[in-house]
Image: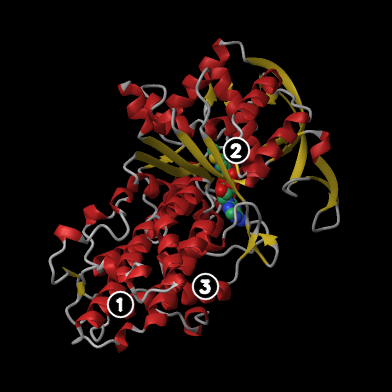
């Protein structure tokens, strides 16, 4: 049906909305870069894609941060929200919607969502007594709490998972019947083994569901929390910030108005710290409200510095704007996605960034482009004609076994990359691309086309073949890398003379694109030379401080 058809080609990807209690750091940029990569990839595949990010501005934590800064909460939120937006824009994060939970459209969505749950009898007035972590804005059971000492040696209780301090609270408030959803949640996960990715996080959620699943407090007394959305019909209570925050994904989709087109194809990127909220509370709320569940929850691990999770409270944050000034925006994007392994934490150092970028972008990829476009080898500045007859072994061609391996690898590369992008394993996609780039460099190196005699017609034909094949490899790499390093890919493809409308997934067509009738005998013109593809970084880049 046309309905199916439309939905098939729609895609909606989100990042968490970030708390505005502190400035953005590298971890926030990481989530945004992953989501941006998925968004750009889907666009290249011909999808209509919507990509949302933004800021989470309500709750006790923000209220306290604004107080500490001596600012009125909205002014405070606006300032920090703008810092996130600025970071994302300067890093080419191509979001299509930037949501702030203080916006009117969001308030309307939350009020509506609350009323739906209320009308279905899923929210009741009760009294909550238990542990609360303001830093995590999270309720914890006794088993999730342990003893610790604070900096002054005082005995305190902390969350086992985050290490943040918890306090005992006792209040009248509204409760959500979370306990009623355990079996539906289990069914959902069992029926959708890829709902939470990577696999180990799906297992972690199943584990969570084995434990006690008590009803959830979804409001706070107004005298404790003013900075939030009041409970509809009861201004003495403020809606719990996580219920408020999660609904942002619906707000962007258009809820409570027409939201089906986007909501049916929603995918969330999150850090592992907020897995419980996204894979237990959120689906339970949605089931309660009778709405479809997200298609995928992509979970990534954390960036650490000297083994410690990067966070404001530890004071070890890496400033992503400073990094992208040192290493370029594309450089940081490439590093984060090449080194970031979703399944496990990764340690950040400037030195690692420099080494990786020099090896893979400057030397390997940039070097390959230089070789194939050097005027000595390619005086006409063209994609020369491809002579397939230079390749078949049986006709005494000069190609060797490894060349055929390289061709096979590049031919199957788009499918490999596609598979890894789809499962958020960008590092595996980049590993595969990087291996192919090495193979192509090996191919050129092996045949030393610059040594061939251009006046000898056989030699000339073989040389043209080598150059054509290498340029074709570069075109494939440039196309596949667009979601990761958009500026560098654009530079590469422009240098190859690949027009904007020839850069989609459907246009890949390795080795067949520029041969045959479309290809005049003189070859197809390259684009203008706009300089080095990726400038080598030296110690001067990191020694600025
Ligand atoms: O939790 N490494 O906001 P938040 C990698 N407002 N990613 C990291 C990271 C690190 N060291 N630190 C943070 C909230 N992140 C809520 C979310 S969503 C409805 C509400 C990333 O500002 C990662 O995506 O604490 C993590 O989940 C998120 O920032 C937490 O951001």
In the image, residue 432 lies at what x, y percent? Answer: 50, 61
Question: Disc 3 marks which residue?
Answer: 356
Residue 233 in view:
no
Q: Do labels 1 and 3 touch, CB within 8 Å?
A: no
Quadrant location of residue 194?
top right
Residue 412 in view:
yes
User: What is the distance, in whole Å, between disc 1 and disc 2 at their CAs?
Assistant: 43 Å
Sequence-first tag of 1 and 2: 2
Q: Residues within 10 Å of mark 2 (few under 14, many from 20)?
A: many
Tally the marks.
3
Figure quadrant of the N terminus: top left
Above or below, 451 relative to 478: below
Sequence-first tag of 1 and 3: 3
User: What is the distance, in whole Å, between disc 2 and disc 3 at their CAs?
Assistant: 30 Å
Q: Do labels 1 and 2 touch, CB within 8 Å?
A: no
Question: Disc 1 marks which residue?
Answer: 372
Provide the secondary structure element on which disc 3 rests. Answer: helix
Name the residue rendered at 40%, 46% in the picture. 39
Above or below, 152 relative to 474: above
Mark nearer the viewer, 1 or 3: 1
Q: Residues within 10 Å of mark 1 (few under 14, many from 20)?
A: many
Q: Nearer the viewer, residue 401 or 20?
A: 401
Q: Residues within 10 Å of mark 3 (few under 14, many from 20)?
A: some
Question: Disc 2 marks which residue?
Answer: 196
Horizontal side, residue 312 vs residue 151: left or right:
left
> What's the mark number on residue 10?
none
In the image, residue 225 lies at what x, y percent? Answer: 61, 33
Sequence-first tag of 2 and 3: 2
Q: Nearer the viewer, residue 194 or 70?
A: 194
User: What is the distance, in whole Å, between disc 1 and disc 3 at their CAs?
Assistant: 23 Å
Provide the secondary structure element on which disc 1 rests. Answer: helix
Q: How is the image coloured?
A: secondary structure
């Amino acid at each position: 049906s046309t309905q199916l058809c439309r939905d098939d080609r729609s895609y909606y990807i989100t990042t968490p909305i970030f708390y505005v209690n502190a400035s953005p750091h590298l971890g926030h940029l990481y989530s945004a870069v992953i989501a941006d990569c998925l968004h750009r990839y889907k666009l290249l595949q011909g999808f209509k894609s919507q990509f949302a990010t933004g800021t989470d501005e309500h709750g006790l934590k923000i209220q306290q941060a604004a107080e500490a800064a001596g600012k009125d909460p909205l002014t405070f939120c606006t300032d920090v929200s703008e810092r996130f937006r600025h970071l994302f824009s300067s890093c080419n994060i191509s979001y299509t919607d930037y949501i702030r939970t203080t916006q009117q459209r969001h308030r309307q969505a939350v009020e509506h969502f609350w009323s739906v749950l209320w009308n279905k009898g899923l929210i009741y007035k009760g009294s909550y007594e238990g542990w609360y972590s303001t830093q995590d804005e999270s309720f914890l059971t006794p088993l999730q709490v342990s003893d610790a000492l604070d900096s002054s040696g005082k005995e305190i209780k902390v969350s086992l998972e985050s290490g943040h301090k918890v306090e005992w609270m006792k209040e009248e408030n509204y409760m959500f019947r979370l306990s009623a959803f355990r079996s539906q949640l289990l069914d959902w996960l069992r029926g959708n083994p890829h709902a939470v990715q990577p696999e180990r996080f799906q297992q972690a959620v199943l584990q969570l569901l084995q434990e006690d699943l008590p009803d959830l407090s979804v409001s706070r007394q107004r005298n404790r929390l003013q900075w939030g959305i009041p409970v509809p019909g009861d201004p003495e209570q403020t809606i719990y910030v996580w219920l408020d925050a999660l609904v942002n994904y619906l707000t962007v989709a258009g809820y409570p108005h027409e939201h089906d087109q986007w909501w049916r194809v929603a995918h969330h990127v999150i850090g592992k710290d907020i897995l419980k909220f996204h894979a237990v509370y959120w689906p339970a709320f949605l089931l309660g409200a009778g709405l479809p569940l997200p298609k995928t929850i992509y979970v990534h691990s954390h960036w650490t510095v000297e083994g410690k999770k990067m966070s404001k409270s530890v004071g070890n944050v890496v400033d992503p704007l400073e990094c992208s000034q040192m290493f370029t925006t594309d450089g940081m994007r490439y590093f984060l996605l090449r080194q970031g392994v979703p399944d496990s934490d990764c340690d950040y150092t400037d030195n690692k960034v420099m080494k990786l970028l020099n090896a893979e972008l400057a030397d390997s990829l940039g070097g390959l482009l230089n070789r194939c476009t050097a005027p000595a080898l390619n005086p006409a500045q063209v994609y020369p004609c491809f002579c397939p007859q230079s390749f078949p072994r049986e006709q005494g061609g000069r190609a060797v076994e490894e060349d055929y391996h390289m061709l096979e690898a590049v031919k199957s590369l788009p499918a490999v990359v596609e598979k890894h992008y789809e499962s958020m394993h960008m590092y595996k996609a980049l590993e595969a691309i990087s291996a192919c780039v090495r193979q192509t460099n090996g191919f050129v190196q092996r045949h030393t086309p610059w040594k061939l005699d251009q006046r000898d017609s056989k030699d000339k034909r073989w040389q043209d073949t080598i150059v054509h094949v290498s340029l074709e490899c570069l075109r494939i790499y440039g196309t596949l890398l667009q979601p990761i390093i958009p500026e560098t890919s654009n530079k590469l493809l422009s240098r190859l003379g690949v027009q904007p409308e020839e850069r989609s997934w459907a246009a890949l067509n390795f080795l067949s694109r520029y041969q045959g009738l479309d290809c005049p005998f003189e070859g197809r013109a390259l684009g203008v030379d706009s300089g080095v593809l990726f400038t080598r970084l030296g110690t001067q880049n990191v020694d600025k401080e």
